[in-house]
């Protein structure tokens, strides 16, 4: 534990991790630049449409940055204990509110707010990922007293987090977000060291191994026939089959993936030049959202990808560095939860657009167009910065 300075006048901003702060700013700025470029094709010469897209992302980025700074300043474990019920209620309300709005792509995952010149959409499931980390930290970490039964210990977080995931997966039909939420919950569940959790943690670990083996099996040539018999929607089966071989249906289910692979091949090491993507002017779905990485690599090449990779890597490594140093389980859950939130999105997005895993519709955080994902990622980083700041200040070990 780092000792407090005698002056007592140490200002909080100097206790934040500057590397995380800098990498976040670089990612958001890089994302704004690439969203502008990728949206040119979607705008189809409509300057007003392009300006509208870019302006929305700039506003969301500014709001996200302010929220990140505010959360980093005010978040404490005491406030978490006092307000966890409010956080849970708000999460339920907004997840259910999204069901009242029209579906997009088969999913009822967005709240639509009419605004002059268009509308603003909010995706509550992005913020529910943060709620999952906070629920786990509030109910399962740093427990000193034994509970009457094992079920009493895990009942509340299991019911709350399970409900969040089921609402998103079943009622909202947003399977990609539900998988990310479940993955975050499962991984950080392994962190608390309470003796009565050991049995459940062993079961969860085995489920993780089984899940990885299952995914590898499904995307292997052996698993293709098995996919046809799974109780999934046709578009979900098509995504799995396209990951195995997108060229089987290159003008149908595999069209998006094939175009993404062509963009990767065109980019090479240095790219064709910023703004010079050809693919974005074709009928390339989600060029500025889920598949923005294809445009990044086409225009800026492998070097453009490395900007993203290095910034993500820096944030994740710094979060793990502090998580391993501190004894506080709440702190470790929040830091590792944020790191896994970023890492899982990265793996799912990059794996999906390169055909290594089935497409999940998961955005590349702070790079893809989308206000909810950008703000949620920055808020999560703000919570982590608050934990780091107070650890460095000596508020806990």
Image (spheres, rainbow, N blue to C red):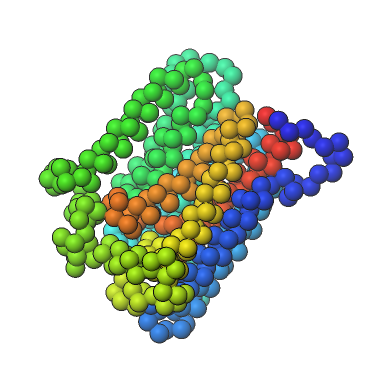
Residue 363 falls left or right of residue 375: left
Residue sitting at x 65%, y 41%: 388
Q: Quadrant of the C terminus?
A: top right
How far across and how far down the image is residue 368, in percent?
45, 62
Q: Which residue is at the front of the view, 75 or 204? A: 204
Residue sitting at x 56%, y 39%: 320
The answer to whether residue 67 is seen in the rendering is: no
How far across and how far down the image is residue 235, in percent?
22, 56
Residue 377 falls left or right of residue 382: left
Residue sitting at x 42%, y 31%: 158
Numbered marks: total: 0
| Above or below 303: residue 21 | above
| Above or below 342: residue 369 | below
How far across and how far down the image is residue 350, in percent?
38, 55
The answer to whether residue 182 is seen in the rendering is: yes
Q: Which residue is at the front of the view, 392 or 261? A: 261
How far across and how far down the image is residue 47, in percent?
46, 84
| Above or below 275: residue 314 | above
Q: Which residue is at the front of the view, 114 or 260? A: 260
Residue 242 falls left or right of residue 184: left
Identify the image quadrant of residue 353: bottom left
């Amino acid at each position: 534990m780092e000792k407090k300075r005698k002056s007592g006048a140490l200002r909080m901003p100097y206790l934040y991790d500057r590397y995380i702060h800098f990498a976040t700013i670089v990612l958001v700025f890089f994302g704004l630049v690439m969203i502008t470029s990728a949206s040119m094709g979607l705008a189809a010469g409509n300057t007003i449409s392009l300006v509208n897209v870019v302006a929305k992302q700039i506003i969301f980025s500014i709001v996200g940055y302010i929220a990140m700074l505010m959360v980093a300043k005010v978040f404490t474990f005491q406030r978490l204990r006092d307000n966890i019920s409010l956080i849970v209620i708000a999460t339920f309300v907004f997840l259910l509110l999204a069901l009242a709005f029209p579906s997009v792509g088969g999913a009822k995952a967005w709240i639509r707010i009419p605004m002059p010149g268009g509308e603003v959409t909010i995706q509550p499931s992005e913020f529910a990922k943060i709620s999952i980390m906070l629920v786990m930290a509030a109910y399962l970490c740093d427990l000193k007293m034994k509970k009457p039964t094992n079920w009493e210990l895990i009942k509340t977080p299991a019911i709350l987090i399970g409900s969040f995931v089921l609402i998103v997966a079943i009622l909202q039909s947003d399977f990609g977000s539900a998988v990310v939420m479940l993955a975050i919950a499962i991984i950080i569940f392994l962190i608390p060291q309470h003796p009565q959790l050991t049995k459940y943690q062993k079961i969860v670990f085995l489920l993780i191994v089984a899940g990885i083996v299952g995914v590898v099996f499904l995307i292997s040539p052996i698993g293709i026939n098995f996919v046809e018999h799974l109780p999934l929607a046709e578009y979900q089966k098509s995504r799995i089959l396209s990951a195995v071989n997108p060229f089987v249906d290159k003008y149908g289910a595999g069209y998006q993936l094939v175009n993404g692979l062509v963009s990767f091949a065109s980019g090479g090491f240095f790219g064709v030049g910023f703004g010079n993507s050809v693919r974005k002017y074709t009928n390339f779905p989600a060029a500025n959202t889920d598949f923005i990485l294809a445009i990044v690599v086409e225009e800026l090449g492998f070097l453009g990808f490395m900007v993203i990779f290095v910034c993500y890597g820096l944030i994740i490594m710094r979060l793990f560095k502090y998580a391993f140093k501190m004894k506080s389980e709440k702190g470790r859950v929040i830091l590792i939860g944020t790191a896994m939130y970023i890492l899982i999105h990265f793996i799912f997005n990059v794996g999906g657009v390169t055909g290594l895993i089935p497409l999940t519709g998961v955005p590349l955080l702070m790079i893809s167009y989308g206000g909810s994902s950008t703000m949620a990622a920055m808020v999560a980083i703000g919570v982590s910065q608050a934990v780091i700041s107070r650890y460095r200040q000596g508020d806990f070990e």
